[in-house]
Amino acid sequence: MDVLKAIGQWISTNAELLLVGAIPVVISVVAISLAARSLRYEKASADAAARSAQAAERANLLTERLLEREHLIERPAVEAPDVSWRIENPSGDLYLLRNTGTATAEDVTMPDEMLSGIPKHLPNGAIVRPGDAVEFYLFGRWGSPAPHTVYLQWRGQDEPIALPVP
């Protein structure tokens, strides 16, 4: 009984200290949960913005085509579009597919079934203007490195071409 009495007395004399110590812990837990929720909304917003930008690019291209058909704007006749590619690796598993040609590439697709690694955010129906780039990620699989080659196709290039990965 003396032990329980001593514990009760210790709690009653130190209750203020326990309360003061518990307040920052509660505030920290609430802040962490709010930050986690904010991060989820931020990621969803970034994904939606990327989809919106791609849709706007497609809408602009469709408008240009319609105006060309209606002969409201004229473009010089080009025999074959000058599209060439370079893959850059700015950091880690992040890669950039850059259009180094002078023509806009439409319906740019990197078929994932031809890759040995784990891809993420591969271009699929993308529009890439000259000098512009699209981001994608390549991860190794089960201890093996990321693929050394990716395959790419776009409108006017129906057969996939091989591109070396740096």
Image (cartoon, helix red, strand yellow):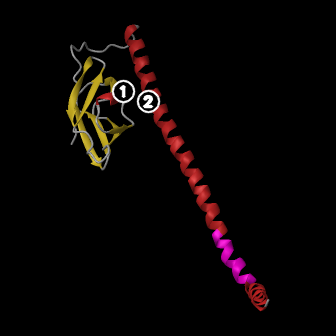
Would you say 111 lies left or right of 85 here?
right
Check the image and name the residue furthest to the front: 1
Residue located at (35% from left, 37% from top)? 119
Rendered-image quadrant of the N terminus: bottom right
Q: Position of residue 42 (x, y in %)?
A: 53, 46
Residue located at (51% from left, 36% from top)? 48
Look at the picture and state if 119 lies above or below 129.
Answer: below
Q: What segment carries the magenta color? A: 15-25
For residue 54, the mark is: 2
Q: Position of residue 21 (x, y in %)?
A: 66, 77
For residue 30, the mark is: none
For residue 127, the mark is: 1
Q: Of residues 101 and 110, which is closer to you in this image?
A: 110
Considering the numbered disc 1 on the image, is that residue within a helix, a strand or a loop? strand
Q: Amino acid at mark 2?
A: Gln
Considering the numbered disc 2 on the image, is that residue within a helix, a strand or a loop? helix
Q: Is residue 7 magenta?
A: no
Would you say 57 lies left or right of 163 here?
right
Residue located at (39% from left, 36% from top)? 121
Q: Position of residue 41 (x, y in %)?
A: 57, 46
Q: Position of residue 163 (x, y in %)?
A: 21, 32
Would you say 151 lies left or right of 121 here?
left
Alpha-carbon distance for marks 1 and 2? Answer: 8 Å
**Magenta segment, prevailing SS (helix, strand or loop):** helix
Look at the picture and state if 19 lies above or below 149.
Answer: below
Count up the numbered dots: 2
- Residues at badges 1 and 2 in contact (C-beta under 8 Å)? yes
Q: Amino acid at mark 1?
A: Ile
Q: Specify whether residue 74 is in view.
A: yes
Q: Of residues 15 and 40, which is closer to you in this image?
A: 15
